[in-house]
Amino acid sequence: MTDLVERDVAAVTPSPASSPGPSSAPKSRLRSEAFARRLRARHAAERRFRLAGAAAVALAALILLLLLGSIVAKGASAFWEARIRLEVTLDPAEVADRNYTAALRRALYAQFPQVTDRAGKRVLNDLLSSGAPYELEAMVAKNPALAGTTQTVWVRADDQIDQLVKGAYRRDLPETERGLSDAKVAAADALLASGALAQSFNTTLFTAGDSREPEQAGIGGAIIGSLLTLLVTMALSVPVGIAAAVYLEEFAPKNRWTDLIEVNINNLAAVPSIIFGLLGLAVFLGFFGMPRSAPLVGGLVMALMTLPVIIISARVALKAVPPSIRQAALGIGASPLQTVLHHVLPLAMPGILTGTIIGMARALGETAPLLMIGMVAFIVDIPRGLTDSATVLPVQIYMWADSPERAFTERTSAAILILLGVLILLNGAAVILRKIFERRW
Amino acid sequence: MQLTLLALTLALLTVIGFLIGRSRASSSVGGRVAELHSVPAYHGVYVALWAGLPALLLFVAWTASEGWLVLQLVLSALPERLATGDGQSVALLKADILNLARGIATGREPDPLVMEAARRYTAFRDLADWSLLAVGASLAVAGLAWGSHRIGPDLRARPVVERVVRVALVLCSLVAILTTVGIVLSLLFEALRFFSVVSPLDFLFGTHWSPQMAMRADQVGSSGSFGAIPLFAGTLLITVVAMLVAVPVGLMAAIYMSEYAGRGVRTWLKPALEILAGIPTVVYGFFAALTMAPFVRSVGEALGLDVSSESALAAGIVMGVMIIPFVSSLSDDVINAVPQSLRDGSYGLGATKSETIKQVVLPAALPGIVAAVMLAVSRAIGETMIVTMASGLTANLTANPLQAVTTVTTQIATLLVGDQEFDSPKTLSAFGLGLVLFLVTLCLNMVALRVVRTYREKYD
């Protein structure tokens, strides 16, 4: 490249002395070596700049992958849980007493005939989840005829055993560094070898409420809480938001008042979400005396928070409907309200729907304002109504993230995966809706 | 229960009203609908409004005042000894009655008189609910009868209905104003209560933050101090780190996407950035606390640095990542708004693409980009979950991003989580912080939004 330019310069450019014509001077400057160098530098700068842009995009994509990858790596195993197979003999007397622990322990000791001392038995007891008796109780409650029989059951293992099976503890480390005693590892290995300890699909994660024991904790309660909260949010913010957008876009006179409302809505959309939590705490809980931790209050706060988003997107959608539609409707005698309700609003509906879905996705992922109104409490029961104490999925994630147990880290990641899955579905639906109904006028 | 019943009754009567109104309208002109002033459906809505609206208004007014009225009734029936006293003991008494009425144990052996009051409270509420049901339902039936009585060929149903709808629309658009007013009033009111205990100057310029208050007067060493400077400094530090990540990356990504990337790349990149923008902040917080913080710490240790496990750097980096899509989509809009003629002029003079971007497009877009950065700063200041999960709780006054700092939002969240009494300076201080946060972000947003607006008008 360099050679070529220089040769060209030599071949084409006459020496300045022989032809001092005015037209050749700029030409020679363009072909000079200094110019060629400058041009190369400029092109290099161009490439560097372009590369920097691509690097920025690649960095963002890389971080996204890293984030998703780390969460998948941590959370994928939570969709399985370790269970232990036991031959349980249900003594009728014990069933009447609702004492299932003894039956479980007998069945477990039977698999380890060599263990006779108390310490050894205690190790065995710790293999089972403290919730295992309740599983048995639920089974017998469903079928009382089981009392007095011997049944093969798979009961939940303790979270440490669960983590051992999933490979979270390293067997080659000494006991003190591993955090799990050799005796337990040996017992679990014996069960593994006999096929009495195995992993199965983790339904607890989806159905159970919160618990202090990781193996009994699930996001069932949080999902119901999220649904209830979202229901309230949707019931309030969608109609009010659309109505406000219709008024501002179609009916409002352009004056100082409507200007104020407009500026106000734009600002409200950028107010930190935690401020809405403070509002909910002071007004809904403090002033109106509504119950703490209730999906009703959470939904109200979220509705106020998503309202500006919905209003703004609905206004954009309404603005996109061409004036000719309105003029045609008015021209054949429709009233302004009929024009809007019968013609403009239906045409703007896909856009409004897209904005609404995005607003709802945002409400679904929001955490901070709900901490303020007490939805962060430890709630075992699955909520049944709008005024029951409840928590929501993001807050459940926040609470679990604080727990030191490995098993909770794993379940937190799984909960995040489920939350992200729902959000991506929602956003994807919004994108597809936009694609399908996109209309150029 | 009664309320659900009332709601169902009202809904049913409204539907019936609509049907009656519509059929009466067309039968009043013998099926020749053209003789009506308004189309039959408007007559239907007219009757439905008469049936539903007065009862609904009654319902709202009643439920808003019922609890208070009944409580006053119960309190006035109590003997002097209990009901009089300073504000606090009356408030306690009210809370006791309410809790007992709801069947929540108060933890104290309740006074038989209070028990009796709670029983009366429940009975009165029950009575009030039933009478609301009766009054509401009869009001709805009366409205329905009156509305359908008025139907005739000359009834101007449409203007009436449209006026009501118009009023409803205006009310809906006022909700946004009411929200702002509610935010300002609640923050101001609670913050003033806080500032009556702690001087605003101490709060804004004090350098020591430890919001523990003495539970008893004789307790040692925990008088509580509310100097918020360390919180402001911590917030600023994390925000600066976040901006150092978000602005260059976000801006370069926006430039690449709007100026260089082809259609194919764009169709993939935009959704990817939207996903990044749609990830809940609690997920970023988890990532910051469990992945980024240990990573930063181990890198720092490998370099021989002393890094806190809750370093401002880790929280700041993750917050920056969170803000990248925000910055890039805002700047993308701004860059796209620069008219093509400016670029063409620059190309015509022989500039390369990057020279055009750096010397023509970016200067032209600068106000908008500055506004985007301001909005991003406001977002970073107000972000709660990442800092709550990944930054510290102790207030350090330091400019070293490797140490743990705490932020305004972290303190608000931790001060108000859990069951604390609502009146202590400790909880009230959260509202003081909230007020500062609200004012700062409001100023940033106002200025930024104004810049964006004037900027748009300039190139439109």
Image (spheres, rainbow, N blue to C red):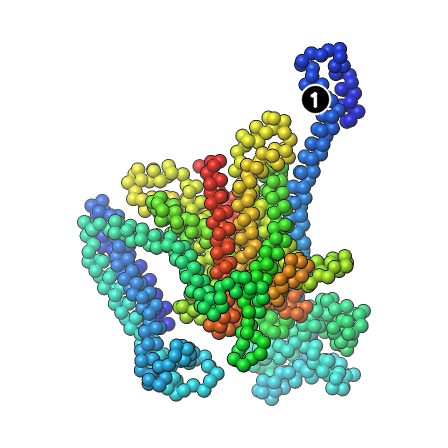
Task: Give the x, y percent position of residue A35.
Answer: 72, 25
Task: Tell me the quadrant of the picture where the C terminus of chain A can be found.
Answer: top left
B11 relative position to A317: left or right: left
Nearest the camera: B84 or B203? B203
Q: Amino acid at mark 1?
A: Leu
Task: Give the x, y percent position of residue B129.
Answer: 32, 73
Task: Give the x, y percent position of residue A6.
Answer: 78, 22
Task: Tell me the quadrant of the picture where the N terminus of chain A can be found.
Answer: top right
The chain under label 1 reads: A
Disc 1 crowd rating (10 Å Cα; few below 14, some 14-19, many 20+) is some
Residue B33 in view: yes
A22 relative position to A327: left or right: right
The residue under the point 29% across, 50% down is B162
Task: Give the x, y percent position of residue B320.
Answer: 61, 52
Nearest the camera: B33 or A169? A169
The residue under the point 67% across, 38% down is A49
For disc 1, the marked residue is A30
Q: Secondary structure at mark 1?
A: helix
The residue under the point 57% across, 71% down is A210
